[in-house]
Amino acid sequence: MDKLIINGGKPLIGEIAISGMKNSAVAILLANIMIEDECIIENLPDISDVNRSLEILEAMGASVTRLGDGCVKIDSKNITPCSSPDELVRKMRASYYVLGAELARFGRTNVACPGGCDFGVRPIDQHIKGFEALGATVSVNDRHIIALTDDGLHGGSVFMDVVSVGATINVMLAAVKAKGVTVIENAAREPHIVDTANFLNACGAKISGAGTDVIKITGVASLHGVTYKIIPDMIEAGTFMVLAAATRGRLKVSNIIPKHLESISAKLEEMGATVEEDDESVTVSLAGSLSPANVKTQPYPGFPTDMNPQMCVLMCLANGKSRMMEGVWDNRFRYVEELKRMGADIVVADSKIANVNGSPEGLYGASVRAIDLRAGAAMVVAGLAAKGKTEIDDIFHIQRGYEDIVGKLQRVGADIKIVSTPDA
Ligand code: EPU
């Protein structure tokens, strides 16, 4: 079992280059299932969710060649239908993209129920509703999701009852090779949806409107291979932006698309940080004190739910009362108990609102767990901001989504290291 050891309380100063976006990478890698050709995907982050996606492709019969430096060649010609291994699929949420991609290529799919972070109930009813609108017959038991068609999918209209990233991408994948036109209304607008659509269009798909709430897909008969570069990870960037303010340091967060970070930049400025924007970087610093703020997480372009825990750490360090309202997931505040071990004064109401009573000396080092991926990132931010020693267990959650987090932080002056302890 690996754990992180942090000696915090020092301002972090320097530059951190952001890696490719996890949630784009997993969608684009699994979309390769529907391309009977060779693709080269660049700027892949070296994280366990990407490695698991590649393992799923290999187990299904794709040839995967790691070319180094975040670059992978994938040849999916020999993929066998309904062959994704249950044990790999159950380790990550995004494996539900196998459903849409297999339906597109083979007109049938059979995939184990996906795993991922535990935020309470994580339904997939909108994915199923979309597949059914395109002509699939879908059945779900407690272990598998099975979808069948008589003669492939046809175009259809889908109105999403909730704004869902996964359902929007999955229905878009399924529709790319369906006969006729598909329209998805009330679609999610996250940058990774645009990235996935750009990749598919480069392969010959006809998708318009990605990034708006209406996406139109005209089915095509076949797709061809391309070389494609994944966009930078806005949540990794946002995490380091918050870290700069939390440690009262100055970090240039580079290799980013600043537009994707507007909701985070605006909130940091409201709390008293300085955010200087360039074409491909933002520099965040804090000289004075932090003011409290209220945040409500929402689908893009609102404040991202995947920044809820990290932002809550900053609220713990502000002068006064802040409020974090979760507008996407039912139960995203499981990390609060861990932050309380570090001295945080937080009361959660109805599992949707965290009332935070902050103070500049509000956190001290302690032993905590990474409850999930972003909760783990928040523990790293808290540990680096707090005086004293913090130990973080269960860091495999953090390694699912942050490339070389220890190396990147050491290079800007953090006292952080990874230690291996024998399994209990
Ligand atoms: N929802 C439904 N029915 C569905 C699908 C979703 O009711 O069929 C609800 C969910 O319960 C939730 C809301 O819709 O309340 C939004 O869920 P969404 O489908 O957008 O989430 P997701 O696609 O499963 C992705 C990211 C998450 C991120 C959410 C929200 C990937 C692989 N995961 O999940 O990222 O929190 O969108 O932005 O893209 C992370 O990176 O740490 C992470 C958890």
Image (cartoon, rainbow, N blue to C red):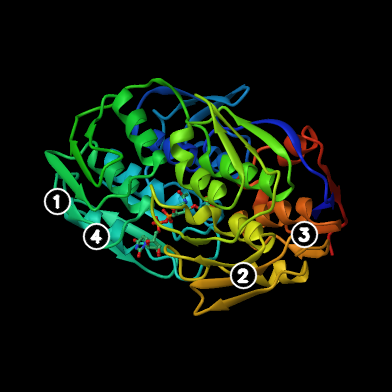
The local secondary structure at tag 4 comes to helix
Amino acid, disc 1: Ser
Say if mark 2 contacts mark 1, CB within 8 Å: no
Amino acid type assigned to the residue bearing label 3 in the image: Asp
- What is the three-letter code of the residue carrying label 2? Val
Say left or right for 178 vs 240: left
Cα distance in 3D space between marks 1 and 3: 46 Å
The answer to whether marks 3 and 2 mark residues whose Cβ atoms lie closer than 8 Å is no
Q: Position of residue 410 (x, y in %)?
A: 80, 37
Q: Say the numbered circle drawn on residue 129.
A: 4
Nearest to viewer (mark 1 / mark 4) = 1
Kindly identify which residue carries mark 3: 393
Quick one: label 3, few (<14), some, or many (20+) residues within 10 Å?
Answer: some
Instruction: Find out if the beta carbon at label 4 lies less than 8 Å from the nearest ligand 1 atom.
Output: yes
Q: Give the Cα distance between marks 3 and 2.
A: 24 Å
Tell us which disc is closer to us: 3 or 4: 3
Q: At 37% across and 54% down in the image, what residue appears?
A: 110
Q: Earlier in the sequence, mark 1 or mark 4?
A: 4
